[in-house]
Image (spheres, rainbow, N blue to C red):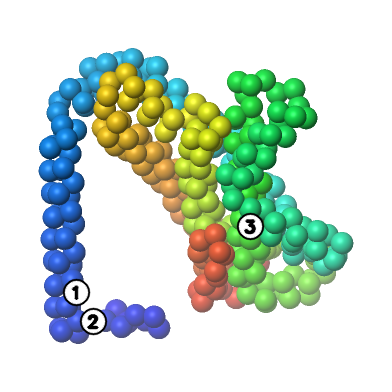
């Protein structure tokens, strides 16, 4: 099926695609064979390296499950704070008042530019110097602070792009019936922009969950990835431990994206979406499928 961006391949193009696919599969298989062979030569495939994850319940109850709990705690706290804060910052960037728009824009641009690791380190130093937070909770506070500051700024840009992806007619129609700017934003633009923003928002939530590992590596947060050191020290199985931890991250992120996909489907069925989609944290907009003014609720 042809479209503006895609032409149906002909017989020669289909043949080339099959050849490229076959070459890619062969290359991947060779790389996998080399990796497994190297691991076997180093004894990383021996049963005693993997058996602790099956036979030793302490590996899960002492290390992996507490690590998952700490990862989810830090990630969920950061998500709960960053999402509404990012939405407010995004709306502030669209304000008609310069005294709101300019400071909010400066805030967003600053925290988007600073690496999240640096924000965590600054947060930890500030909590040490100016707060009474205990040393046990300080890594969690610092990690959440860095994640919130950085990701709320990114989410603000996603919100701006999602709202701007809507057809201009939506705003014009709302103004024509006498709605104020706040009413237009609340009742017309934001409900329709949610479905356009959702894919990019889900990607950013996955980033938040994975970036908790930075706190474990630098600040001593007892999250999932940091448990690699303790498990490896007890069982001398670094590679198998990293493989298991990677699989656990995949499961958590898959669960998050599956829930988001279900939610997106429900929202689209409610017919509040415009058809536009915001892609990635750069908030690029494809408004080609946007509907007309008749969709305003």
Q: How far separated are the C-alphas under marks 3 and 1?
A: 40 Å
Task: Residue under label 2, please give it.
Answer: 9
Q: Nearer the viewer, residue 44 or 208?
A: 44
- Res 242 quadrant in image: top left
In primary-sequence order, the first of circles 3 and 1 is: 1
Q: How far separated are the C-alphas under marks 2 and 3?
A: 42 Å
Asked whether the beta carbons under mark 2 and mark 3 sit within 8 Å of each other, the answer is: no
Mark 2 Cα-neighbour bin, 10 Å: few <14, some 14–19, many ≥20: few
Q: Nearer the viewer, residue 22 or 160?
A: 22
- Res 30 quadrant in image: bottom left
Task: Residue under label 3, please give it.
Answer: 113
x then y, percent, for residue 214: 51, 39
Mark closer to the observer (2, 1) = 1
Asked whether the beta carbons under mark 3 and mark 1 sit within 8 Å of each other, the answer is: no
x then y, percent, for residue 272: 58, 60
Q: Is residue 56 left or right of residue 148?
A: left
Which residue is pictured at 52% across the width and 57% down the height?
Answer: 200
Q: Nearer the viewer, residue 271 or 92?
A: 92
Give the number of marks: 3
**Image quadrant for the N terminus?**
bottom left
Q: Is residue 144 visible?
A: no
SS for callout 1: helix
- The relative height of residue 254 versus residue 159 in the rendered view (above or below) is above
In primary-sequence order, the first of circles 2 and 3 is: 2
Asked whether the beta carbons under mark 2 and mark 1 sit within 8 Å of each other, the answer is: yes
**Image quadrant for the C terminus?**
bottom right
Task: Residue under label 1, please give it.
Answer: 17
């Amino acid at each position: 099926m042809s479209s503006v961006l895609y032409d149906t391949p002909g017989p020669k193009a289909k043949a080339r695609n099959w050849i490229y696919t076959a070459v890619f599969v062969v290359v991947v298989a060779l790389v996998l064979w080399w990796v497994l062979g190297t691991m076997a030569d180093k004894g990383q495939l021996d049963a005693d390296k993997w058996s602790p994850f099956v036979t030793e319940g302490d590996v899960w109850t002492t290390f992996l499950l507490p690590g998952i709990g700490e990862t989810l705690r830090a990630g969920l706290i950061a998500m709960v704070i960053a999402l509404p804060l990012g939405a407010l910052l995004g709306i502030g960037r669209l304000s008609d008042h310069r005294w709101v728009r300019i400071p909010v824009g400066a805030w967003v641009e600053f925290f988007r530019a600073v690496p999240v690791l640096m924000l965590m380190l600054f947060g930890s130093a500030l909590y040490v110097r100016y707060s009474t937070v205990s040393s046990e909770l300080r890594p969690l506070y610092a990690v959440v602070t860095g994640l919130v500051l950085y990701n709320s700024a990114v989410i603000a840009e996603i919100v701006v792009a999602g709202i701007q992806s809507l057809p201009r007619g939506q705003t014009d129609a709302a103004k024509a019936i006498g709605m104020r700017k706040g009413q237009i934003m609340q009742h017309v633009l934001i409900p329709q922009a949610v479905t356009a923003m959702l894919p990019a928002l889900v990607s950013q939530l996955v980033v938040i969950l994975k970036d908790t590992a930075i706190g474990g590596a630098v600040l001593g947060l007892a999250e999932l990835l940091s448990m690699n050191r303790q498990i490896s020290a007890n069982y001398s199985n670094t590679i198998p431990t990293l493989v298991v931890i990677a699989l656990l991250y995949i499961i958590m992120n898959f669960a998050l994206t599956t829930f988001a996909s279900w939610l997106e489907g429900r929202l689209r069925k409610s017919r509040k979406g415009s058809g536009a989609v915001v892609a990635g944290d750069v908030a690029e907009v494809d408004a080609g499928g946007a509907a007309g003014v008749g969709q305003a609720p």
